[in-house]
Image (cartoon, rainbow, N blue to C red):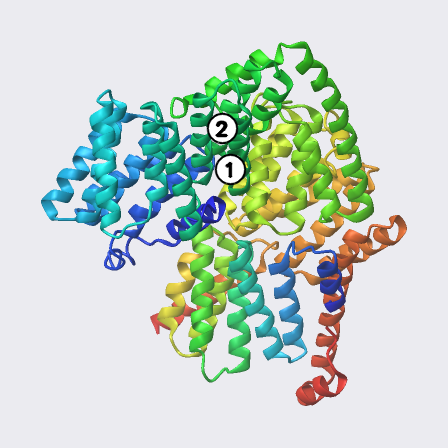
Amino acid sequence: MAGDFTGAQANLVEALRIYDSERDRETRFRFGVDFRVTATAYLALTNWHLGEVVGVRELIEEAVAGAVESAHVLTQANTHHNQALFEILRGDAEAVRRIADTLVELSQGHGVALYLAFGSVYSSWARARLGDHATGVRDLRQALAQYTDQGNKLFSPFYQGLLAELEAEEHDPGGALARIDEALALGRQTGERWTDAFLHRIRGDILLKADPENPARAEEAYRAAIAVAREQGARSFGLQPALKLAKLYQSTGCPVEAHDALVPALEGFSPTPEMPEIAEAQALLATLEETDRVRAQAAQRRHMTHLRVAYGNALIAARGFGAAETTEAFAKARESAYGEEDAPELLAADFGLWVSGCVRGELPSMRTRAAAFLRDVEARPDSPEAGVAHRTCGLTHWFAGEYVEARNHLQRALALFQPGRDDDLAFRFGHDVGVSATLWLAFTLWPLGDAECAVSLVGRAQARIADLAHIATHAFGRINAAIFELMRGDHARAAQNAVELARLTREHDLPFWRAFAVFIEGLARAKRRARRRAREHAPRRRTSARTEGSDV
Amino acid sequence: MRRGVELLREQKVPMFDGLLKFALAEAEAWADNSETALAILDEALATSERTGHRTFNAELHRVRGEMLLKRDSANPAPAEDALQTAIAVAKQQGARSFELRAALRLAKLYQSTARPAEAHAVLAPALEGFLPTPEMPEIAEARALLAALAETEQE
């Protein structure tokens, strides 16, 4: 409700992850509704807002099926309410009408006033959209008044926005704009900000329709909608105003501005009948890209991207993967590479951003970046870069403790790797891609119980490292071999690798890796001393530990 | 080791936090600093909850169980809880090696408290499908313990 869609998604995914159908069977209605069903429906809506449109319908259908199975009236009503919201967001008035009828009947039958009010709002909106405009608008005003008279404020900004949109069609732009202002003010007052981008977009539509000769205020409203959507990660609410703004720019002879507005908003969306705006935006973009001015600007942007990636790589060496400057350089490269599809600079920026999130331990950012990387190589699923993208996905799952998913991606990464062809990728992706895919697969197979295969993969990686001159790969191989041995519990072998790593960090000035070497060498030293102490002073062990102090 | 952790912190690199923390906790335990070790493990588990990095959660719970047992062997219940949690987390993640380690430790605990049937019940499913290999000595150890437990049951 607050407009923190990324946070909402993380929490809802976690809620569904920890749900245990056996354990929670009896307690699921303790909070008024079946929490698995409602979490599924909320996740569907959240994903839609985040632009993850594919799969939303399946989630909604899963929630509806769960609600029916629960035979619990409030759960069913709540699910139909969320289902109606989804169809309104899609603009399918016929579907909304059907769902609203069910919701009204269910609510009337069981005397559930809140959901009856929701149902009346949806039913009126659908009637207006399906042709009976005047009656629908009148009923919607009345339903909304009854809803607020019950003391309800939740969803009011959204409903006010829907009504304003309809009122503007009745040639009452002044009243519609006043209603939008009221809705925005209510959102600020209650903190319900998820509709802000939606309301600004409607304001833009109303202003443009009222005064098409003077589009400056509409442009401002669309820009406000885009800015809010970007801040909230609300990609679907961001695409809609971007499309409107791009059309406005195109109609005023500004193709470059139209292109710049549309490209970042469209990034990552694939056409789906669930959101027709995607196909429309893609068609407009293709038209804009045919113009000379957009072509000239694209060439200039490619040059800038190239420079930014080079700068990001230089910062990795100088400041480290996790430095804010490194992330910023790759973020700018990514921004200027929008629309370049699988261009080498775009993929290098994808990787740079993912690795920055990885070393800082930011799992949500890792997930987003890995998914973006995989999308960017979609056109060439067997390319060497696709292997790197699968490695980032695999490693992201590994950090989340999702070993099975990690194994699937890492096996794909290793299958795509071709020695010789892919040797130079080390200079674009930090270290040798074959070595890293092999080692990370070993890291995954060992916990999964395939110890022999894991150890053999570490041996294979080390054999390849011996043939390479790329120093970062040597350091990467050593630290990961040390960590692998640490995971297995073989501290002596871990220490051997740490000693070699320490030598490399000294000789080649690699501060990033030095910390790991210092740690593992210290561990081996602590273990040696503990053993010696246990051997020599077993009867006085407790006293010795205190008087000698800690070796850690 | 602490210097290494400090260097990683200076570089804002929390990668492998769970693994390094459990290694650090083990080292503290070798130096008889059980309380420090437990505090490190609790911090690592809290960090994991916050960040979603769950790679080594099963291991953190296992080592925590071992530390709790070392601190107060007369009261094994908290250790048993921690080891059970380790097994549950490992199972949920499909991390069979981590599951075997935790199950082995719990089986030893049950054996030492004269509960051979429970020891067998926890160890047998965790060992299923594993073949002895020098790459994972825990397998041979678990098989030997299972055989000993089977003999106890026959007696």
- In the depicted structure, whether residue A419 falls above or below residue B96: above
How many numbered discs?
2
Label 1 and label 2 in one chain: yes
Image quarter hosting the N terminus of chain B = bottom right
Secondary structure found at label 2: helix
Q: Residue placed farthest to the left in the image?
A: A109
Determine if residue A408 is in view: yes
Q: Are marks 1 and 2 in contact (CB under 8 Å)?
A: yes
Quadrant of the rendering where the C terminus of chain B is positioned: bottom left
Q: Position of residue B74 (x, y in %)?
A: 47, 85
Q: Nearer the viewer, residue A112 or A424?
A: A112
Q: Disc 1 designates what residue?
A: A229
Image-quadrant location for residue A268: top right
User: Which numbered disc flags the more N-terminal residue, 1 or 2?
Assistant: 1
* Local SS, label 1: helix
What kind of residue is marked 1?
A: Ala
Task: Name the chain letter of the residue that bears numbered label 1.
Answer: A
Image coordinates of residue A5 in percent, x first then y, are 46, 44
Chain bearing tag 2 is A
What kind of residue is marked 2? Pro
Does residue A202 appear to the left or right of A242 in the view shown? Answer: left
Q: Give neighbour class at mark 2: few <14, some 14-19, many 20+ (Cα, 10 Å).
A: many
Residue under label 2 = A241
The residue under the point 77% across, 52% down is A512
| x 71%, y 76%: residue | A530
* Res. A251 mark: none
Task: Judge by depth and name the residue closer to the eye, A543 or A141.
Answer: A141
Point out the residue furthest to the front here.
A174
Task: Tell which of A83 and B46 is nearer to you.
Answer: A83
Image coords of residue A209 (percent x, y)? 43, 21
- In terms of depth relative to the viewer, which is nearer, A477 or A89? A89
Q: Quadrant of residue A335 in the image?
A: top right
